[in-house]
Amino acid sequence: MGVLAGLLFAFNPVERPFPPCIFYKLTGFQCPGCGTQRALHCLLHGEWKDAFLYNPILIPALALIALLLYLDSFGGKRQFPKLHRILSGSKFIWGVFAVIILYWIARNVYHFL
């Protein structure tokens, strides 16, 4: 993971393209992850606004991933059992899935307006 972060820090995906999104190449539609490489590059350089513009769902997703890692790997499950139960429950998981699908649709509708 450190090597990938180092590459994203050193090389700007806008100037030196990393592997393209296969879904975008095949369909012309953006997937929920489109723009993530550029957004991560911006985050590593402290450019929060640009990161948000490349992929608005990335920053909340990273925050959620960090919280889940804390809960599962660093004792947070014992400290916050109710929060862990909520975030591990099927309703929450289906809710995240629904948000991703809605984001996917919205970004493509907005893109083609």
Image (cartoon, rainbow, N blue to C red):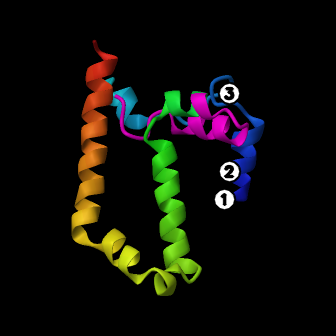
Q: Provide the secondary structure element on which disc 2 rests.
A: helix
Specify the segment rendered in magenta.
30-49
Q: Residue type at mark 1?
A: Met
- Residue depicted at x 39% and y 74%: 83
Q: Residue type at mark 2?
A: Leu
Q: Residue furthest top?
A: 113
Mark on residue 16? 3
Residue denoted by label 1: 1
Question: Could you tell which of marks 3 and 1 lies nearer the N-terminus?
Answer: 1
Whether residue 88 is in magenta: the answer is no
Residue denoted by label 2: 4
Quadrant (top left/top right/bottom left/bottom right) for the C terminus:
top left
Q: Is residue 113 left or right of residue 9?
A: left
- Residue depicted at x 38% and y 29%: 24
Question: Could you tell which of marks 2 and 3 lies nearer the N-terminus?
Answer: 2
Q: Provide the secondary structure element on which disc 3 rests.
A: loop
Q: Residue type at mark 3?
A: Arg
Q: CA distance from mark 2 to mark 1?
A: 5 Å
